[in-house]
Amino acid sequence: MKTNNKLIVITGASSGFGLELAKEFAKDGYPLLLLARRIEKMEALNLPNTLCKKVDVTNKEAFEKAIREAEAVYGKTDLIVNNAGVMLLGDLATQNPAEWKTMLDVNVMGVMHGMQIVMNDMKERNHGTIINLSSIAGVQPFENHAAYCASKYGVTGLTRVARGEMSPFNVRVLSIMPGAVNTELLGHTTDQEIIDNYNTWKSAVGAVNITANDVAKTIKYAYELPQAVSLREIIITDTKQDS
Ligand code: NDP
């Protein structure tokens, strides 16, 4: 545990990785700002030293306002985990472009908003960490993932560029690339056959044992390494995942 705990901002903290991260960091007394649209899920955690705000990450103004409010209470952001994301799987030839836009807006624009809100202060302080949730689908293709891959390859690319921009200022910029992990993520896909096929594949290969908490603990580990150590990219999957 770090002795001088500073503010941690987690987007998408109402379920999955973000919710597990909030619980893990809270155990060690970090002050937290939790952001998502379902504020009741975050408030129900009842974590100490924690502000919860109903924020859609596509709305940069609201996103920034929430962070500035938290910083007025806890001091400047030392870590932002740009975790909020959506996965709407579909066949490129037939999928509704509105679903592509949702993914690009949340997964790419939302991450860039979060980065820009904290970057300048981090540069000034020569300290800070930005962790973006990409995906294994941000480095390799998967069936029915065209628009999701576009968004996550985007996160991988923009994170690599930002790492170069921020390294002279001693600011770490990392990306986490998980494989399939059971959370609410798949449930938003609107094509039931694609959901069923995805679940059938996961069960057939046995890639069902890694948990959201395993991913959260890995992210916390990367953050708690000394500031001079940058675990730039982490691909983390169930040992049995075959692709
Ligand atoms: P969940 O669906 O469980 O959680 C997603 C979170 O994002 C929720 O808290 C949701 O909150 C939030 N969110 C979605 N849209 C918005 C928005 N517009 N504004 C603010 N918050 C939003 O999924 P995971 O925990 O699995 O996913 C977390 C991240 O990890 C995502 O970026 C995902 O792409 C990535 N990932 C997940 C993998 C997996 O297999 N689970 C694999 C690889 C990457 P709310 O709806 O309340 O706003």
Image: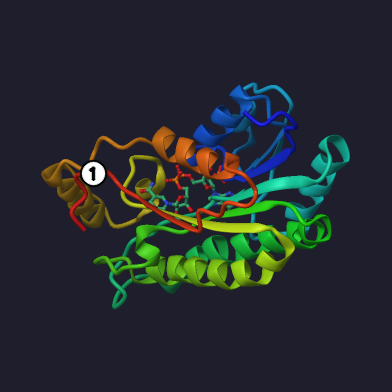
Left or right position of 233 against 29 = left
Choose top left, top right, bottom left or bottom right for residue 184: top left
Say which amino acid is labelled 1: Thr
Residue lying furthest bottom in this view?
93
Q: Is residue 48 depicted above or below 123 in this figure?
A: above
Identity of the residue drawn at 48% across and 67% down: 156
Residue 201 visible in the shown view: yes
Q: Position of residue 5 (x, y in %)?
A: 72, 33
Q: Which residue is mark 1?
A: 239
The N terminus, quarter of image: top right
Front residue of 68/193: it is 68
Identity of the residue drawn at 75% across and 59% down: 117
Residue lying furthest left in this view?
204
Front residue of 242/59: it is 242
Front residue of 64/178: it is 178
Left or right position of 119 against 131 = right
Look at the image and name its color scheme: rainbow
The C terminus, quarter of image: bottom left
Q: Position of residue 150 (x, y in %)?
A: 42, 72
Q: Is residue 116 depicted above or below 192 in this figure?
A: below
Q: Position of residue 67 (x, y in %)?
A: 77, 47
Residue lying furthest right in this view?
72
Q: Position of residue 36 (x, y in %)?
A: 61, 44
Left or right position of 143 against 98 = left
Identity of the residue drawn at 70% across and 67% down: 168
Asked if the residue at label 1 sits under 8 Å from ligand 1, the reply is: no
What SS does tag 1 mark?
loop
